[in-house]
Amino acid sequence: MAYSKIAACFGLVLASHAYAGTRTSFMPENDLGKMQSEAVGGITKAQFNAVIDRAEAIYKPIIAAHGGTLVMHRNWDDSTVNAYAEQNGSNWEVSMFGGLAKRPEVTEDGFAMVLCHEIGHHLGGFPYVQDWAADEGQSDMHATGACAHKVFGQNLMLSEAAASDLPAEVKDKCDAHHASSADRDICYRSIVAGKSLADLLAALGGTGPVNYNTPDTKVVSRTNHQHPAAQCRLDTYMASAYCGNSQWDYTLIPGKSLDHFSKEAEAEAMAHSCVDGDGARPTCWFAPLGDNPTPPADECPLQDPALCAVLCQLEPSQPWCE
């Protein structure tokens, strides 16, 4: 009896691990979709499809150049408040949901940034959370640092609103880092969009409000590959917006052909990003590999804490088990 329970439990871990290892999410799994009505705000179905249309047209050839086929899943009638990326063979998939699009915090630009985040899992490169997928922080960096410059259509209303909403000191930083008015406009809009998403993440986590001028002061000793806290994610959107798209090279996925946890992969990524200053990866989630580039041995290799707990029941001697 005990053996059959252990075998069944181990099978569950393997099956769940395989699932967790092939899909990434924009935010932690949640029940927000079950608690909201159909008409809660957010964007319309037409906006939902228009944003996906733009991204699909732009990124299909980019992903094809890397041997993949971009597959967009448009789940407007699904109440899920999340978004997912996964790879199945040569299909590089992104799933977007009406439940997320209808959230009151989500603007058209904010929805575009979620889509850009999921595309970033495919193209962002080092640091990696699994074999094919850039981690959460790096996917956020891709959203405002590269993708926004491609998917934001001209929108005078959104541009004026962003310029009006941003504090003067944030606008000044955008202006200092970007010479053209078009790039400045994207910087403003990216940061305001990032704020809308950080507000959603704060609502999910039950944390205090996020703010442009209250950066997360945490300094991690090793890179957090999971979802950073809401303020840290806003800091990331802001940093990458300051860095801009001049460093990005879509002919390369940094570190993809290298050991994902090596200094060589890190160096390749750093050559295509802002290494220091306002545009650098925030220390609230990112830490350079230093002299110990191997993955930490005391962290559970699964992405789901519940699965880690099950694994600890089977093998309590693992270093990540309390």
Image (cartoon, rainbow, N blue to C red):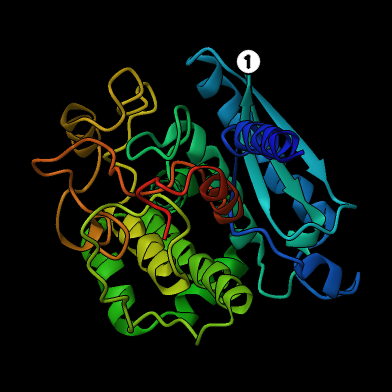
Q: Quadrant of residue 170?
A: bottom left
Q: Left of 254 or right of it: where is 228?
A: right
Q: Position of residue 185 (x, y in %)?
A: 43, 62
Q: Left of 283 or right of it: where is 315?
A: right
Q: Quadrant of residue 271?
A: top left
Mark 1 surroundings within 10 Å by alpha-carbon count, few (fewer than 14), some (14 through 19), many (20 or more): few
Question: Mark 1 falls on what kind of element?
Answer: loop
Q: Left of 297 or right of it: where is 40?
A: right
Residue 99 vs residue 164, the one in the foreground: 99
Q: Position of residue 218 (x, y in %)?
A: 26, 72
Instruction: Single out the residue that lies furthest toward the left.
Output: 291
Q: Position of residue 254 (x, y in %)?
A: 31, 29
Give above or below for 255 relative to 151: above
Q: Residue at x 51, y 23 (%)?
A: 62
Q: Left of 276 or right of it: where is 231?
A: right
Give above or below for 312 relative to 162: above
Residue 34 vs residue 198, the one in the foreground: 34
Give above or below for 265 relative to 143: above
The image quadrant where one finds the N terminus is top right
> What residue is pinned by disc 1?
89
Q: Residue at x 45, y 75 (%)?
A: 163
Number of numbered callouts drawn: 1
Q: Residue at x 33, y 74 (%)?
A: 171
| Three-letter amino acid code at the position of disc 1 | Gly
Q: Position of residue 314 (x, y in %)?
A: 55, 43
